[in-house]
Image (tube, grey):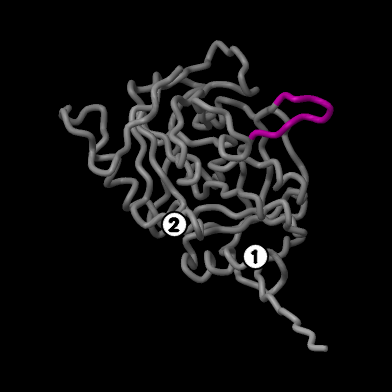
Amino acid sequence: MKFFVLFLTVSAVTGSPLTEESSQYRFKRRITADLTEFPYHVQLVYKYKVPLITRCSGVIISENLVVTTANCVSMSPTAIITGIQQMDEISPFRQMGKVKKVKIHPSYSSITGTYNIALIMLEFPLTFNSAVNKVELPPTSYKPNNTAKQIAWARQSLSLKYTLEVTGKQISNCNSRMISVNLLQLLRALVEGDHVLCAKGESPLSECHKFSGEPLVQDKYLIGLSITGFEKCKVIASTSVYTNVAKYVGWLTSEMGSCSPNSKESTESPTGFTTASSVV
C-alpha cells in the first residue's frame, strides 16, 4: 500500500515583537473616540448588505474624496456617513455624502490583495467643521516608527452596537515568516514588500471582527488602511495588516488633482472612475 503525504508551506505576515516601552498600549482602548480628534473616519454604506464584504470604513482626504481599500469598493458603496461615534446614530454632526464615482488602483489584484487602495468621489463636497474634516497624507519618504493609533468600529460586549474606538498599536514593516496562515499572504508579502505595514496591539478575536479601510494614524498623518478577510480569523498572533499609504501618495495626489471640486466640470467621467450604484 502506498501512502502519499502532502506538505504545504504557508506563511504569516507578522510584525516585530512589542517593546517594553510600547507594551503599555496593548489591549488598552479609549472606548469612545473623540470626533474632534479623529474627524476623518467614515462609514461606507451599500445598496445591499452582504456580511464581510460590506464591513468597510474609509478616511476623508479632501472635501469630496475618501480613501479606502480596494476590496471595499468591489461592490460599489452608495454613500458615506461621517460625524458619528456610534454606527447608525443620529448625531448633530452627522453628514451623509452620496457616492458619485469610485476608482481602484490600476495594479490591484483581488486574488492576492496587492495594491489594495481605492478612491471614492462624492457627489457634493462635505462641510468641514470640528467633527468632520480631512486627515493629512504622509510625505512619500515617511518612515513609520514606534506606536500609532488605530481608529475603528468595535462591537460592545453584550450589545449589537458598534462604537468608534482608539487602540494603541506598535507598527513595523511586514516580515514573511514560515508559521501558518496561507500562501496568499506569502505572495502578498513577496509582491508588495514595503507596500504593506504590520501592527500589534489587539487580540486574535478582534482581528476577526475588524472592518477593512480603518485608518492607522501617526502624528498628523494617515499611514495605513486596515486589510481584513476570511484568513484573519485563522491568525493565532494578534497581528494586523495595513496598506502602507505613503507608498501610494503619488497616485493619490495625481487623482486628487483631477477630482478637485474646483476643477473644471466635464461631461466625461474622470479617467478610470466607475459610476456608483443609485442610492435607494
Q: Is residue 263 above or below residue 129?
A: below
Quadrant including the N terminus: bottom right
| Residue that appears at 70% across and 47% down | 207
User: In the image, which disc is placed on residue 280?
Assistant: none
Is label 2 in a helix, a strand or a loop?
loop
Q: Amino acid at mark 1?
A: Asn
Q: Judge from the rendering whether residue 18 lies leftward or rightward of residue 100; answer left or right.
A: right
Q: Is residue 233 magenta?
A: no
Residue situated in front as seen by the camera: 27 or 76: 76
Q: Secondary structure at mark 1?
A: loop
On the image, the x and y values in percent for residue 87 come to 63, 23
Cα distance between the residues tagged 1 and 2:
17 Å
Magenta span covers which residues? 153-161
Question: Callout 2: few (<14), some (14-19), or many (20+) C-alpha neighbours within 10 Å?
Answer: some
* Residue 121 in sight in this render: yes
The number of discs equals 2
**Which of 109 and 258 lies nearest the eye of the viewer?**
109
Pick whichever of labels 1 and 2 is earlier in the sequence.
2
Prevailing SS of the magenta stretch: loop
Q: Residues within 10 Å of mark 1 (few under 14, many from 20)?
A: some
Q: Relative to residue 154, is residue 220 drawn left or right? A: left
Q: Quadrant of residue 23?
A: bottom right
Whether residue 128 appears in this view of the structure is no
| Place of residue 134 in the rendered image (x, y in percent of width and height, measured from the top left) | 43, 32
Q: Amino acid at mark 2?
A: Ser
Q: Indicate the quadrant where residue 212 lies.
A: top right
Q: Which residue is mark 1?
A: 182
Name the one closer to the observer, 150 or 141: 150
| Label disc, if present, on residue 109 of the rendered structure | 2
Residue at screen point 49% across, 42% down: 220
